Amino acid sequence: MQAQPVQRTSDGLVLWGMYLLPKGIGLLLSLEMIQLWPDLELLYSHHLLSASHIQQYQLPWSMFNINTDLIYVFASLYILSGLFMCFHSYTFLPTLSLFILHYSFFVANSVWNYGVDYLAQTGLFFSLLFGGRQALQLKSLGLTNLGTTFFRLQLTVVYFFAGLGKAFGETWWNGEAVWKAIHQPIGASYFSVPLSAYRYEHLWVLLGIITILLELCYPLVWIKKNIRPLIINGIILMHIGIALSMCLLHFALLMIWYNLCAWDHPLLNIAKPNIKPLEPSKPKLQVPIATETINTTKGGTK
């Protein structure tokens, strides 16, 4: 009989997604800090914010409490921690380091933080507990799906309530919210929409309704696996549109990476080593083959 080929089980794919999770987060956060490097002294000094204003809005462990000269030291540690998470198999200590530093830089003061900073902090938390080698340890304990389940629940809550908030208003149903979003003066976009496009009202209405439906239907990926690719790929395309039209590249890439890792997207297989089937083995006989007939001079009768 021939040996059966090695199969990729669903647990193996789930394990691979959580194993990769901290690597993508570390790379994205490192690149973001490198982009902010020229402005660090301006952002974390008293040039833009007064001491009383900083005192009013900051939490403990804020980088505003650190000497300006040390800001670049901690920023360098931030970048190195993220790169270590990305390019090394051991991720616990660098993830813990980046978790603390990210909080100090972007979460501890409400003046500079945005929604994406809290989403990144959440991803670091899941990476710390369930990502990298922690995923392998959970598998050895028979808890392969534990981290993935909690991570999926977190994404489901985020998307569902985001869609619910949009559904209660009118602007997402009539296209006004989409039109305003792509014309926010927050920076140059990669794909600009001319003002004359306001005449295509039905297009903006359609995009707004699709956005609401994608987010409200996000919980269906748990119970309807046949429509999971439709919803997840739709979410990914939505974030690509956000990146191109609103220039929110950091936010879009972070959420795309979360969805890829959480739901075992086929794109993750690009980085997954190929598992070759076992070589078929020839059947082994239980008894040796006789090399002489019974009519020989060594025995038997003629």
Image (cartoon, grey):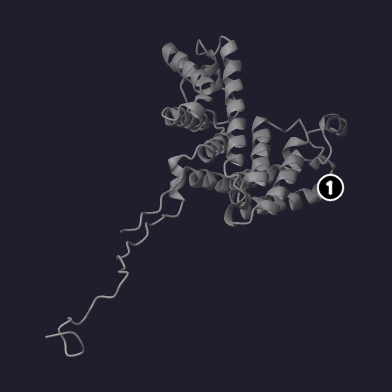
Q: Is residue 183 visible?
A: no
Q: Residue at x 77, y 48 (%)?
A: 71
Q: Does residue 291 appear left or right of residue 142 in this picture? A: left
**Crowdedness of circle 1 by 10 Å Cα count: few (<14), some, many (20+)?**
few
Which residue lies most toward the front here?
Answer: 301
Q: Residue at x 83, y 45 (%)?
A: 66
Quarter placement of the N terminus? bottom left
Dot 1 lies on which element?
Answer: loop
Q: Residue at x 28, y 75 (%)?
A: 288
Q: Residue at x 46, y 51 (%)?
A: 272
Q: Does residue 257 appear left or right of residue 274 in this picture? A: right
Give residue 285's quadrant in the image: bottom left
Which residue lies most toward the bottom here?
Answer: 297
Q: Give whichever of 18, 52 is nearer the camera.
A: 18
Residue 56 drawn at (x, y percent): 85, 29
Q: Which amino acid type is marked by label 1?
A: Asn
Q: Give whichever of 186, 76 is nearer the camera.
A: 76
Q: Give whichever of 232, 151 is nearer the camera.
A: 151
Residue with the mark numbered 1? 67
Q: Is residue 176 above or below residue 20?
A: above
Q: Is residue 8 above or below residue 89?
A: above
Residue 29 drawn at (x, y percent): 63, 44
Q: Is residue 188 visible?
A: yes
Residue 57 drawn at (x, y percent): 82, 30
